[in-house]
């Protein structure tokens, strides 16, 4: 049986209700029990790490891909129970493969159906040129520039619009990959923050929560497919950011050691990692956003781009 099989396999039974199983990722489940089990695990993580408090205003970063939509969907179902407000922000980064009319329609439609406040932010031209042009001129990989811009805008937008938390769709696959990448480059400070919740350490930084911390990418996909939720993921980002050498390495480990990624994040959740390194956060001399330098990374790219453009 594949991870999600359209033809119910008569032999494998749902671990919970004994009906024929249709999904078998960590355990076999029928449709109904899979959804229940998935949502219960997210809810338990939220409770265990106190990700949400009564009266919170949470902004979910939604690209239109399966992970961010899974995150927004579970949170929308838990709104009443935990008594919080929910909003979605979709950013047009000005890269047509990432954001286009289709991604906008998918995300907007998703929010309308669930009565979630929808926000749209158009980033194209934010740096003085198209994102692709700026990446080329400043010789920065497009995906890293795109990620940097998105983080900058999400934080500022959330703060300026009264949201006290930002939720992202980062899942166990992402967390494991981030861990190894940063471990090798000895960024322990970053690793120490790689938890289900990263509490704000600066008045201008919004607290981040990762409700899907324990969920596998394959589970997010099954969760979306079973409920037939339309998605419009970015082919460019998922290819360049996900399918790197770490993707292959971790898949290999997973093949030899069952449920490796899941057990890895479960351990990371409780591990106490500290770093001697201290980064003092101040405010960017140019735009006022939080940064550990004099001028923030976004303003530096902007300056560099304009300098090169003027000298041409
Ligand atoms: Zn079942
Ligand atoms: Zn700045």
Image: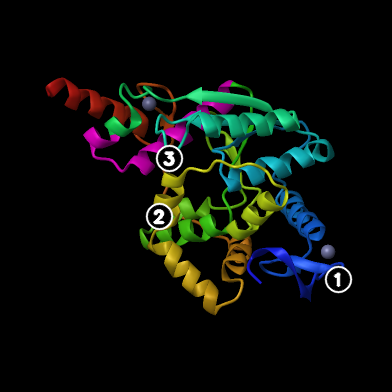
Q: Nearer the viewer, mark 2 or mark 3?
A: 3
Please identify the quarter of the rendering in which residue 229 is found.
Answer: top right
Q: CA distance from mark 2 to mark 3?
A: 18 Å
Magenta residue span: 135-160
Q: Which mark is residue 187?
A: 2
Residue behind mark 1: 18
Q: Judging from the image, what secondary structure is the residue with disc 1 in?
A: loop
Instruction: Rate crowding at label 3 as few (under 14), some (14 to 19) or many (20 or more) other CA atoms within 10 Å.
Output: some
Mark 2 surroundings: few (<14), some (14-19) or many (≥20) residues within 10 A: some
Mark 3, residue position? 147
Q: Looking at the picture, how far across and down is residue 163, in whole percent?
A: 64, 28
| Distance from Cα at disc 2 to Cα at disc 1 | 46 Å
- Distance in Å between CA atoms under marks 3 and 1: 44 Å
Residue 136 lies, with reference to residue 225, above or below; the image says above
Quadrant of image for the N terminus: bottom right
Give the image location of residue 286, x and y in percent.
Answer: 35, 21
Residue 130 in picture, x, y percent from top left? 33, 27
Residue at horizontal 45 percent and vertical 54 percent from the top: 242
Q: Position of residue 202 (x, y in %)?
A: 52, 34
Instruction: Respond yes or no on whether mark 1 lies under 8 Å from ligand 1.
Output: yes
């Amino acid at each position: 049986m594949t991870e999600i099989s359209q033809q119910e396999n008569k032999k494998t039974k749902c671990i919970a209700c004994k009906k024929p199983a249709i999904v078998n990722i960590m355990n076999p489940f029928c449709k109904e029990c899979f959804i229940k089990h998935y949502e219960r695990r997210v809810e338990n993580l939220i409770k265990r790490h106190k990700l949400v408090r009564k009266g919170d205003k949470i902004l979910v970063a939604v690209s239109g891909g399966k992970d961010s939509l899974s995150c927004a969907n579970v949170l929308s179902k838990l709104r009443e129970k935990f008594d919080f407000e929910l909003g979605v922000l979709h950013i047009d980064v000005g890269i047509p493969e990432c954001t286009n009319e289709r991604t906008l329609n998918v995300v907007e439609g998703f929010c309308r159906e669930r009565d979630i406040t929808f926000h749209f932010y158009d980033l194209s031209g934010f740096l003085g040129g198209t994102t692709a042009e700026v990446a080329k001129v400043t010789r920065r990989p497009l995906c890293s520039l795109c990620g940097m811009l998105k983080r900058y805008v999400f934080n500022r937008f959330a703060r300026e619009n009264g949201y006290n938390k930002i939720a992202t769709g980062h899942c166990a696959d992402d967390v494991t990959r981030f861990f190894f990448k940063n471990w090798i480059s000895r960024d322990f400070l970053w690793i120490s923050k790689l938890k289900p919740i990263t509490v704000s350490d600066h008045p201008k930084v919004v607290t981040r929560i990762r409700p899907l911390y324990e969920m596998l990418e394959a589970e997010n996909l099954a969760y979306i497919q079973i409920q037939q939720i339309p998605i419009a993921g970015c082919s460019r980002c998922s290819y360049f950011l996900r399918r790197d050498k770490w993707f292959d390495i971790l898949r290999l480990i997973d093949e030899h050691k069952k449920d490796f990624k899941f057990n890895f994040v479960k351990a990371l959740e409780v591990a106490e990692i500290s770093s001697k390194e201290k980064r003092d956060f101040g405010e960017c001399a140019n735009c006022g956003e939080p940064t550990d330098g004099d001028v923030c990374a976004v303003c530096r790219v902007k300056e560099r781009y304009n300098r090169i453009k003027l000298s041409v």
